């Protein structure tokens, strides 16, 4: 459970903040003229700088999607939570296969699997005041499962749209032509300001170019996705923590989660009444970290010899030595 708690409190906020850093810089640039080709640092013009920020935002969003897929995969196993067993695995447990398989099969995801991801239990296992209360809370579950299904399908579209270029961002000397002006005769793509071309064919570098357009609407779409991840995935993590902390098989929607706040007032009131009884019967336990943390006894080489690196870049040091001679 310590991994879940750490991700809930620090890991997920850190991921979200990093994406927001890139999106904030892109939005700030859109307050200027995107078509201004003033030269920027390292020889990049404004379009190229925006494209680089876009690649950064996409990379961090794809990493978030990897987190979500792996957590959901573990939740579906009905086994003790062990997130990190997959990070260095090969074969069927290879991380890339798990993530790709999850998003490629979202359309086929059964309702029972959605229930597991949301940590919802069987309604017959709970003590309801009466049938009307049970019916109201069943409708809340149905509503939330519908929202979760829509959220995962949205993630699947983003994953499928960007996995090819994401692989090129991570590997293979960045075979992406960034910040390219859209040709004047391409009428169907005039709604975008520029595009980048990701060369994704395994046969030859220029055999297939994937288009990655950019505009203010594109930035807004990334921001909306980030908000969806924040609201929806926070619910998933919190729900799993509820069942682990209380040692129960499942829960119904929590009275104060991001889905429940959007339910009808009578449903929210029923949830509050149910959770009052539920928390009295199953009080949460708050264990500490599982085991001792083993800290490496020395810093990695870069930090051990930091004095050799922090003051000047290599070529400045070489120039200094030449001048001394």
Image: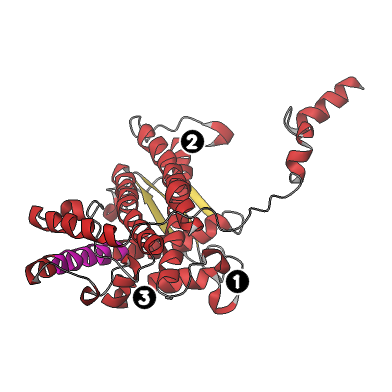
Residue 127 at x, y percent in the picture: 19, 70
Q: Which residue is mark 3?
A: 105
How many numbered dots are placed on residues in this image? 3
Q: State whether residue 316 is above or below residue 194.
A: above
Residue 272 at x, y percent in the picture: 18, 54
Instruction: Return the residue found at the far right.
Output: 325
- In the image, is residue 145 part of the stretch drawn in magenta? yes
Q: Which residue is mark 2?
A: 45
Number of residues whose C-alpha sits closer than 10 Å to that of mark 2, classed few (under 14), some (14–19) or many (20 or more): some
x 35%, y 29%: residue: 32
Instruction: Return the residue found at the far front.
Output: 281
Q: Which residue is mark 1?
A: 89
- In the image, is residue 284 part of the stretch drawn in magenta? no
174 sits left or right of 297 in the view: left
Q: Give me the C-alpha separation between circle 2 and circle 1.
A: 41 Å
- Magenta region: 137-152
Number of residues whose C-alpha sits closer than 10 Å to that of mark 3, classed few (under 14), some (14–19) or many (20 or more): few
Mark with earlier residue (3, 1) = 1
Number of residues whose C-alpha sits closer than 10 Å to that of mark 1, classed few (under 14), some (14–19) or many (20 or more): few
């Amino acid at each position: 459970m310590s991994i879940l708690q750490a991700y809930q409190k620090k890991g997920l906020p850190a991921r979200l903040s990093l994406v927001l850093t890139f999106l904030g810089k892109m939005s700030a640039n859109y307050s200027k003229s995107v078509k201004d080709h003033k030269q920027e640092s390292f020889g990049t013009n404004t379009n190229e700088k925006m494209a680089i920020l876009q690649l950064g935002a996409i990379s961090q969003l794809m990493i978030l999607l990897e987190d979500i897929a792996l957590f959901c995969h573990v939740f579906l196993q009905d086994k003790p939570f062990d997130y990190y067993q997959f990070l260095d695995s090969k074969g069927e447990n290879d991380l890339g296969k798990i993530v790709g398989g999850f998003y490629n099969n979202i359309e086929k995801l059964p309702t029972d699997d959605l229930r597991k991801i949301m940590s919802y239990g069987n309604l017959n296992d709970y003590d309801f005041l009466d049938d009307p209360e049970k019916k109201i809370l069943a409708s809340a579950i149905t509503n939330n499962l519908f929202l979760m299904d829509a959220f995962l399908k949205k993630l699947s579209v983003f994953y499928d749209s960007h996995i090819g270029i994401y692989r090129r961002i991570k590997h293979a000397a960045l075979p992406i032509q960034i910040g390219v002006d859209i040709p004047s005769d391409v009428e169907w793509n005039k709604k975008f300001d520029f595009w980048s071309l990701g060369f994704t064919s395994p046969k030859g570098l220029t055999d297939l170019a994937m288009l990655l357009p950019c505009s203010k609407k594109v930035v807004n779409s990334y921001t909306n996705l980030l908000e969806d991840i924040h609201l929806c995935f926070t619910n998933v993590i919190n729900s799993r923590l509820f069942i682990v902390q209380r040692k129960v098989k499942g829960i119904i929607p929590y009275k104060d989660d991001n889905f429940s706040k959007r339910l009808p007032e009578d449903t929210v009131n029923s949830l509050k009444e149910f959770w009052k009884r539920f928390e009295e019967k199953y009080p949460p336990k708050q264990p500490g970290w599982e085991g001792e943390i083993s800290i490496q006894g020395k810093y990695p080489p870069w930090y051990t010899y930091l004095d050799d690196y922090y003051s000047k870049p290599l070529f400045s040091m070489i120039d200094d030595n030449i001048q001394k001679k």
